[in-house]
Image: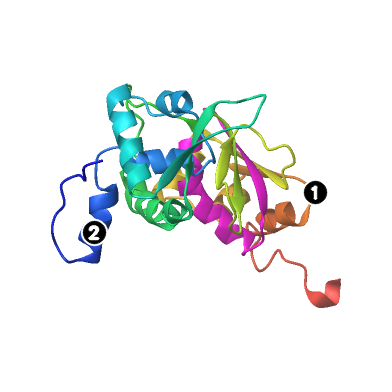
Amino acid sequence: MPRRRSYDHYCAAARALDAVGDRWTLLIVRELLAGPRRYTDLHADLPGISTDVLASRLKDMERENLAERHRLPPPAASYVYELTPRGRQLRPVLAALAEWGAPALAERQPTDAVRAHWHALPLLGPLAEAAGGLAGVVDVVLETGTFHLRTGGGFPVYGDGPAEKADARVVLQADACEALLAGRLSFAEGVRSGRVRVAGDGELADRLRAAGETPESRPCEHDA
């Protein structure tokens, strides 16, 4: 398979862009951070991409050892695409891009497509910070839908719908979600104001609720 055009710069950033700099490639990585996906599922969750471009980008990603195609065992017996270990290393790259681009999320335009799980990476940072490194699975409920994500590392990073067994559940009002993504609201401020609600009985849920406590509201050791 012929290689795509290269910048021909002996530079790490240029080499990286040779592999992932084409339009749609990083957004395909975003979708595959949820785990193996069928071609039809990828196409459905990438509004605006043509079938030809999607097929071309997936072939490019296979050649660059970013993704691989394999057949699921019966009874599914369908082909799926999955990130390779090298492809998974792009997770912090996408997380950094999401953080950098979040302030540009002004009011949603009528032409803007949206999927609930597109908020997974931007929300992962605030949730992981509030969790204090504690690993677990959090259901996130938005007006546009529900998804779950994994704090403390691990793969897949997120998934559509509620988890089979979540350690905590976070419900975000629409305005709170927009403010949290844009950096105008911290997770702790959202919890304190009631715009972010946390449910669950486990340690992770307790940790997320505690993020909204002020030093004055925390019980002193001698009060325990």
131, above or below 115, in the image: below
Question: Which residue is labeled 2 in the image?
Answer: 15
Dot 1, crowdedness within 10 Å: few (<14), some or many (≥20)? few
Q: Residue at x 33, y 29 (%)?
A: 55
The answer to if 142 sits in the magenta stretch is yes
Looking at the image, residue 133 sits to the left or right of residue 13; the answer is right
Residue bounds of the magenta highlight:
117-144
The residue lying toward the viewer, choosing from 86 and 179, is 86
Are the residues flagged by discs 1 and 2 in contact, CB closer than 8 Å? no
Disc 1 marks which amino acid? Asp
Extreme front residue here?
1
For residue 106, say whether it is visible.
no
Q: CA distance from mark 1 to mark 2?
A: 47 Å
Dot 2, crowdedness within 10 Å: few (<14), some or many (≥20)? some
4, above or below 78, in the image: below
Disc 2 marks which amino acid? Arg
Question: Which residue is labeled 1 in the image?
Answer: 201
Quadrant containing the N terminus is top left
**Residue 193 at x, y percent in the picture:** 59, 47
For residue 115, say whether it is visible.
yes
**Residue 56 at x, y percent in the picture:** 29, 33
**Residue 20 at x, y percent in the picture:** 29, 48
SS at mark 2 in the image: helix
113, above or below 25, in the image: above
In front: mark 1 or mark 2? 2
92, above or below 149, in the image: below
The residue lying toward the viewer, choosing from 131 and 74, is 74
Quarter of the view holding residue 35:
top right
